[in-house]
Amino acid sequence: MNSHSGRSVRSARRNEAGHHLRSAIGAESVTPLIGVFDMFSASVAARHYDGLFVSGFGFAASHYGLPDIGFIAWPDMVGFVQRLRLAFPRHHLLVDIDDGYVDPEVACHVVEHLEAIGASGVIIEDQKRPRRCGHVDGKQILPLGEYLEKLRMVLQTRRDMVVVARTDATNEREIVLRAEALAATDADVILVDGVRSAEWIRKIHAVTGGKPLLFNQIAGGKSPRFSLSDLEDLGVSVAIYSTPCLFAAQAAMDRALIHLKEEDGRLPEVADGTVGVADCLSLLEGNLSRHHPPGHD
């Protein structure tokens, strides 16, 4: 096979990512996607789940050390997703692109890049700047027509990538209005972020005409702590867990450094339930391309 043919085959395989995620979303069970914030957290999450979610909250924290209020530059996000896809060729990979980085043309440009490198899907929201995490107060939303035009352009740009249309509306009348409007588009999935009860999930489900729903779970956020079984009973198709790795890492690092200080700088023994050099290297070596199963780049 010449190099040009090889590139064509790789491109064809990458373009199947959206199809695979769409098939999973159409299955009877809820598809869980685990939020990751760097390559190491993704390496751990990929051991346990088939789907990864590139969380804007986590990426802003990891890459910039800043809150998720609009600091992310799209080339940084694209570069991160490219590294993820190379390391995890078979995993679902849903990417939070916030508001599409403000401008509709930029949103479309980013979607083209992400689809070319093998992302499975994107989430694009209707917030206006300054944007905020979907589970905090003070969110502002774009006029509906302005967001729908941006969404329309993104939908025309994507080829097979899954597009999740997200509204951050908090007024109950506006939630219903926007959920109906988003369901009328060619978006694959609808997300009403920060939804506060099972009753409201049912209301949204009732006005979206059977369009798949996504539920965003974040520790300490606005939404209830539902199990996957709960969500399946409520008719939800996808569950994203934005920050379990990030928050666990913060707690574990705090504990480890407090313990190190208490022990006068003496490291703990490596025993069952702890990680040493060998375990860490074993995890990382699994990401080398030579260890990927035959038939995958």
Image: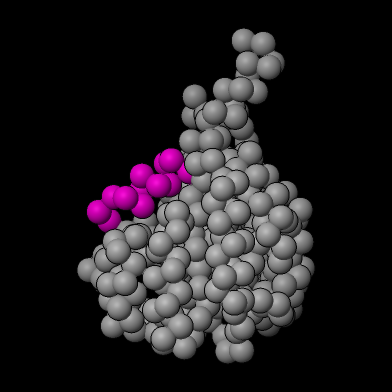
Q: Which colour scheme is used?
A: one colour
Residue 61 figure quarter? bottom right
Where residue 208 sits in the image (x, y, percent)?
Answer: 34, 67
For the point 61% across and 61% down, the residue is 150
Vertical relation: 141 (above or below) 227? below
Tell me what residue is drawn at x 40 percent, y 63 percent.
183
Q: Which residue sits furthest left?
A: 233
User: Where 2 sits versus 91, above or below?
Assistant: above
Q: Quadrant of the C terminus?
A: top right
Residue nearer the viewer, 14 or 283? 14
Q: Whole-percent x and y of residue 7?
A: 65, 23
Query: Front-most of 198 and 59?
Result: 198
The image quadrant where one finds the N terminus is top right
In depth, the one of 120 and 174 nearer the eye is 174
Task: Identify the image quadrant of residue 172.
Answer: bottom left
Give the extent of the magenta segment: 18-29
Q: In this view of the protein, can residue 48 be seen by the observer? A: no
Query: Horizontal and vertical percent for residue 36?
Result: 57, 60
Considering every residue shown, the one lying at the far top of the view is 1
Instruction: Based on the picture, tell me whether residue 28 belongs to the magenta stretch.
Output: yes
Q: Does the magenta stretch include residue 98?
A: no
Would you place residue 264 above or below residue 117 in this image? Answer: below
